[in-house]
Image: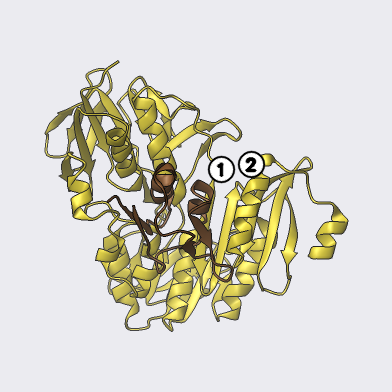
Amino acid sequence: MKIHIDEAKCVGGGQCVVAAPEVFDQRDEDGVAFLLMENPGSELHASVQEAALLCPAVAIAVAER
Amino acid sequence: MTLSRIVVVGASAAGLTAAETLRREGFTGRLTLIGEEQHPPYDRPPLSKQILKGEWQPERIALRPAEALDGLDAEWLLGRKAVSLDVAGRTIELADGVQVPFDGLVVATGVRPRRLPFARELDGVHALRDLEDALKLRDSLRSVPSVVVIGAGFLGAEAAAVARELGCPVSLVDPLSAPMVRQLGGDVASRVASLHRAHGVDVRCDTGVTGFTEDRGRVAGVRLDDGSEIPAEVVLVAIGSVPAVEWLRDSGLPVGDGVLCDEFCEAAPGIVAAGDVASWVHPDHGRIRVEHRMNATEQGMAAARTLLGRRLPFAPVPYFWTDQYDVKIQAYGRPCADADFTVVSGGPDGGPFAGVYGQNGRITAGVTWNMPREARALRAQVIERAPWPRPAAAAANG
């Protein structure tokens, strides 16, 4: 699974961290999301998909591979 | 009931999310999306921010790449307007007379800008709801005109900030006591007023608008209820929205302030609604209608699941944000003007802070001002309905 965060689009809503706290966190200074891991295991794929769906800025792209 | 054809009316965030959820959760029948606009689904929050400012081109706000839309295996009727619904006959009629039958229906037609009672066609007077509106207003700001924004809610306050950042002289007029006071309450709203004033906006609160002055078909100024007039080359009317339900008037569907749904987002058997147009019974808040971006996604998912028989009461924690100048305000829950409010961290001087709203000794909503990480912590407190912070603690931090 390949995850991409568009930092310019991210609005710092933190919905991704709520959905998948193992995978996403937010920068202290501006709340922009970043990845805690590049390649989350399959047990986390559903919550990563949920994070991408819920993102109010459509800033998370997920590619299965 | 097994559905073989589901129609989604409204091809924006809520409608698209509903369609995607239907497919993802196993609906293999015929799926049709009807959209009044020509465009494939796009994101609206940037319209009053990056698009208006000219920082982003329209391609940037597509909600999905073309291949993702193709992957939905849906029929797209874009640039087509639904004009009536026959609930008993399970049919939608389009403006061109075409009849679209369905067994399952998602109503996601959103809202339209509310119009001033005296509004008539004058060059230079704008509304802002869709992409064309935003591009037209963006282009009109290129000559750095004097701007009057009527209405200091989300849209008006954001657009005023953008116009000011582009160098325009800006007046922001609202009949209420402060910008966004209905959404944020008096304390935070007074900070929003200070923010705009610090950037040079002429903030006129407690002030109504009675009419326009014009010069040969073009707006020349805005008349206020104190008898004065503000000269204006460009006027933005941002006085809220009304649900786009006129096509449902004679349908038999319950319609009031939006499509009236139950707690499952269902308005009639096999007919659900989602997004700005949907009024539903929130288990904690009673009947509400929410015009926020986050809700469009969450309710699109919930409404689709109801259609598929996976019925759960829709009980989200409402979330919204707004960007004005270099300030990001985020809120969880439903802040309201008559709730108690206290600052729980940060300073009183226009800098970052976090605050909570409450009633009956419990936290019911939280807000942050340039403290995005704290917003998430407040979300947890809102969900728990945490006890109201003790005055000593609030004072020590505030």
Where disc 2 sits, the SS reads helix
Q: Residue at x 41, y 76 (%)?
A: B232
Query: What is the x, y in percent for residue B129?
Result: 35, 57
Do pointers 2 and 1 mark residues of a single chain?
yes
Give the residue at mark 2. B383
Query: What is the x, y in percent for residue B240?
Result: 46, 53
The chain letter under disc 2 is B
Residue farthest to the right?
B392
Name the tint of chain B in the rendering.
yellow
Dot 2 or dot 1, earlier in sequence: 1
Numbered badge on residue A56: none
Q: Is residue B308 above or below residue B360?
A: above
Q: Residue at x 55, y 81 (%)?
A: B200
Q: Is residue B235 above or below residue B35?
A: below
Residue flagged by tag 1: what amino acid is it? Val
Q: Residue at x 43, y 49 (%)?
A: A51
Where disc 1 sits, the SS reads loop
Q: Which chain is brown?
A: A
In depth, the one of A50 and B219 nearer the eye is A50
Q: Residues within 10 Å of mark 2 (few under 14, many from 20)?
A: some
Query: What is the x, y in percent for residue B167?
Result: 43, 84
Residue farthest to the top?
B1
Image check: B95 left or right of B292? left
Numbered badge on residue B317: 1
Residue flagged by tag 2: what amino acid is it? Ile
When asked about the image quadrant of residue B65, the answer is bottom left
Q: Residue at x 33, y 59 (%)?
A: B120
Q: Residues within 10 Å of mark 1 (few under 14, many from 20)?
A: some
